[in-house]
Amino acid sequence: MEKNSNIAINKNGIRILMCCASCSHHSDEATGTQGLFRACHLEENSGITRRNTSVCKLYDMDSKYVNLHYSETLGKVKKGSYFKMVTAIREAEKESKVPQDEAMSCEDIRKRYLLENDESVYMEI
């Protein structure tokens, strides 16, 4: 398979990976305790089986990707430096055998990050 065979170019020249996530036919459906899973609206009717490594022949780029351009932000994600801090704290707690009910809460870790770094845990993408 060619390296760029699963890449589409939107109307603003941005490369979009052709997969279920960027297809207009997908939806995220709840599955109880399992959380969300990606489902295809066409799969039941078309008989097409989705594979993680291939693109469905009925792929249609979702409108949010068709109109995407570089000045738009897609949302916020947590910074790598924040995750490093969380990992270091959790590993230290594990090493010192801190009981789970006495471990720092996620909120306390976030507050500590804000105090030490004077910046948000999030960054725009």
Image: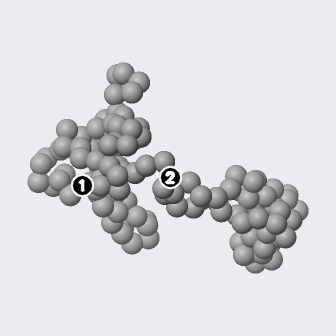
On the image, the x and y values in percent for residue 53 come to: 36, 36
Q: Amino acid at mark 1?
A: His
Q: Is residue 92 visible?
A: yes
On the image, the x and y values in percent for residue 52 come to: 36, 41
Identify the residue at horizontal 43%, vertical 67% (top origin): 35
Q: Amino acid at mark 2?
A: Ser
- Badge 2 element: loop
Identify the residue at horizontal 24%, vertical 47% (top origin): 60
Q: Is residue 16 left or right of residue 93?
A: left
Rendered-image quadrant of the N terminus: top left
Can you name the residue that lies furthest to the top here? 2
Which residue position holds label 2? 71
Identify the residue at horizontal 23%, vertical 44% (top origin): 59
Identify the residue at horizontal 88%, vertical 62% (top origin): 96
On the image, the x and y values in percent for residue 19 come to: 34, 43
Can you name the residue that lies furthest to the bottom here? 101
Q: Is residue 25 left or right of residue 80?
A: left
Vertical placement of 112 versus 65: above or below? below
Residue 51, by quadrant, is: top left
Vertical placement of 120 versus 83: above or below? below
Crowd around label 2: few <14 · some 14–19 · many ≥20 (10 Å): few
Can you name the residue that lies furthest to the left here? 45
Disc on the earlier residue, 2 or 1: 1
Q: Is residue 99 left or right of residue 121?
A: right
Which residue position holds label 1? 25
- Badge 1 element: loop
Residue 118, by quadrant, is: bottom right
| Residue situated in front as seen by the camera: 52 or 33 | 52
Q: Is residue 91 visible?
A: no
User: Which mark, residue 1?
Assistant: none
